[in-house]
Image: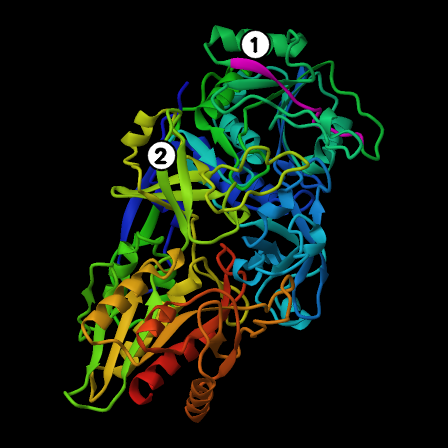
Amino acid sequence: MKAKIAVSIFAILFGVLLLVCGTSAVVTVSGPAYIDDLRNLVDTPAVSGYESQASEQIRARLAAFHPVMDNLGDVIVTIGSGAPHRLLAAPIDEPGYIVSGITPDGYLRLRRIPSSILPPIFNEFYAAQPVKVGAAGGKWIDGVAAGLSIHLQPGRIGAPDPSDIDNMYVDLGAASVAEVSHTSVGLLSPVAINRSFTTLNDSEAAGASVGDKFGAAALLDLLQGLDQSKMSGTLTVAFVTQEWQGGRGLRRILTTTKCDELIYVGRMLPSAFTAADASAHRAPERQPGSGVLLGVGNPDATPEDLGAELKQLADANHIPFTLDYSAKPIDAGYDPPITFPAHWAHLGIATAWPETPAETIDLSDLGRLIDLLGVHYGIGPQSQRESSTIYSRLTAAPANPPTTIQTLQELVTTYGASNHEGAVREAVKKLLPAWARPETDSAGNLILRVGTAPAGAKTPRILFIAHMDEIGFEVKSISGDGLLHVSPLGGMYLSYFLGHPALVHTASGDRAAVMLPPDGWDQPNFKWPSYTGYISRVDVGAKSAGDVAKLGISVGDFITIPKEYRPLLETRANGRSFDDRVGDTALISALWALGGPLKDRDVTFVWSTGEELGLDGARALATRLASEGREPDYVFAIDTFVSSDSPLESPRFADEQLGKGFAIRALDGSNVVPGADVERLLRLAHANQVPVEFGATGGGNDGAEFVPFGAVDVAIAWPLRYAHSPGEVIDTRDVESLARIVTVLSKSW
């Protein structure tokens, strides 16, 4: 039966925002109980062989049943006694990595679990993504998988292949082995991609490991409705570990438990890829919405034995039921083959985009699976029990002047792709001191006159500019099957975004979505397309264009990847759109430090639009100011110094180190700062004890648009790792030094 879910998508994705000042609103989230169980299981990383936290969570959830946990981490509940003895099992683990080494400069090296079966590009789905690293005591440390910065690759020959595990590193923000050891992260610590469970159109669930955890969620829901007094014989319910390592947990249970019947509940399993014959690889074919699946070696055959009984039950109760290909849930590996009970079946539901961060199931399929299990075990339909959860989020501006880091947190968690900067502009205005009265021009730029010199004054006309936009996508069309067709806004590697959860930003609010991987993504010879001109597909859980319209989604809406501000070790932090929310933050912090308008100075602060599309907002402003005879003498463009401070980049250039201060962007793809001005700025920084670096990097900056009209572009920046990705990393000390130098320059350049 159709699962009915009323879910606040925004609340689920973000929970409590990070800013500590302000008030909050309460949002109630309701739906079938298994949604909460699935969310909790997905939110708990459970890399195969390292599932202890998930096992403990399940054991606590089932305390009333007095579960037993063996030394593999299998959680076992036994109900009743005597014959027949029936076994119901579901896996709880997921693929991932363990730490296999630590470099002298504090990066983690990895080994994948499992090494085979997974899609050939599985490693690439981790590149430049936030991850969780297990530490002692069940604690999880935030980290980032290193990725290439698109600005540093032009002209580079033989860049590292992100699919090669030898090119995989995890950045905790550490600078040495000693700093890593202080976190209790070490060799064999598990590593999993950051959790991002979401629901699409109240009908689908998406996120990394959803396909691994739905079986356990179904068993938890089934047990909550169990009336033990009506049970005949013995029922053993097992939540098994190490499915991805050949089904070792299930093998343990079958070896130690002599049962008459087995129902295994989990994803349909592909056969292994083989280098000798990739064409022999077989995979499940059913799509979400197919109902309950019976896993068999030949989907065209007639189900037999227990499978036939389950089909009869499904038909009698109007539960959609069909066959799909699946390999057996136990791979022989190093062990001899194990004998399954004569009476056994593999039940599951379809998973779209399996083993990607965006894998998706249909929630009605999960409800039907729970119903079929309930009928089989004499319990009756289970999928309609309701639950509720309370989330809160920040709704008001800070009550006190924000710190630089609080400002950065607020801006980073605000969304605004190129040509869609409205929410960012409002966030900037909210964070300004009361004396600041900015204006918005026809291009959407936010402009604030900080100082106005009297007529005839010899003070230079100075303009600071930082851009408000971030990279993203825009909806270009909506197909009849409910998929959105979108194109990129700004330069990017598509592999950092496709196959991942996403948000569609509409006039009526945000809608959860997934960016679908390109066709052929699961084939051995797959190559990522160039972002230039590429049209991606986005799933919002709709089945028609009409369904999309009901969600309030229209052509022209923009799409981004969910993000948050995540502190790393020491003074490091991760957050998508540091480019250029750090620059925006520096301007705001400088205004608070200045304390009011400047006398006898001609200084303007600008938060610009459309930089990622080609400096559009800056171009419009430069042209207008020149036509009015008010072109600046100096422009301090504030943007990222894309740094090669990464194990994947060549140190040939752009090798500015995080944590050493703001950076003078002396040369980039759009501008060369005059040497005399570089020296002047260095002297000014040293005189004011502001840490500073300088060098050459890639990309362009807004100040270049003012140069044709006579301005000198003195670009200033901060070092950034993994630019234009969800894994961007900064050192907050550099943000502080950038804000300080903007204050100094405003007063004394």
What's under tag 1, amino acid-wise?
Lys
Above or below for 600 versus 335: below
Across and down, in percent, residue 362 comes to: 46, 27
Question: Upstream in the sequence, badge 2 or badge 1?
Answer: 1
Drawn side of residue 707 relative to residue 359, left or right: left
Above or below for 547 versus 465: above
What's under tag 2, amino acid-wise?
Ser
- In the rendered image, the quadrant that contains the C terminus is bottom left
Which residue corresponds to mark 2?
Answer: 477
Determine whether the residue tagged by mark 2 lies in a helix, strand or loop: strand
Can residue 659 be seen in the rendering of this structure? Answer: yes
Which region shows up in magenta?
321-332
Q: Is residue 330 magenta?
A: yes
Which residue corresponds to mark 1?
Answer: 311
- In the rendered image, the quadrant that contains the N terminus is top left
Front position in the image: 44 or 269: 269
- Disc ID at residue 230: none
Q: Name the residue at the bottom extreme.
A: 687
Q: Residue at x 51, y 42 (%)?
A: 498
Disc 1 crowd, CA 10 A, few/some/many (<14, 14-19, 20+): many
Quarter assignment of residue 601: bottom left
Determine whether the residue tagged by mark 1 lies in a helix, strand or loop: helix
Above or below for 722 versus 362: below
Across and down, in percent, residue 119 comes to: 65, 37
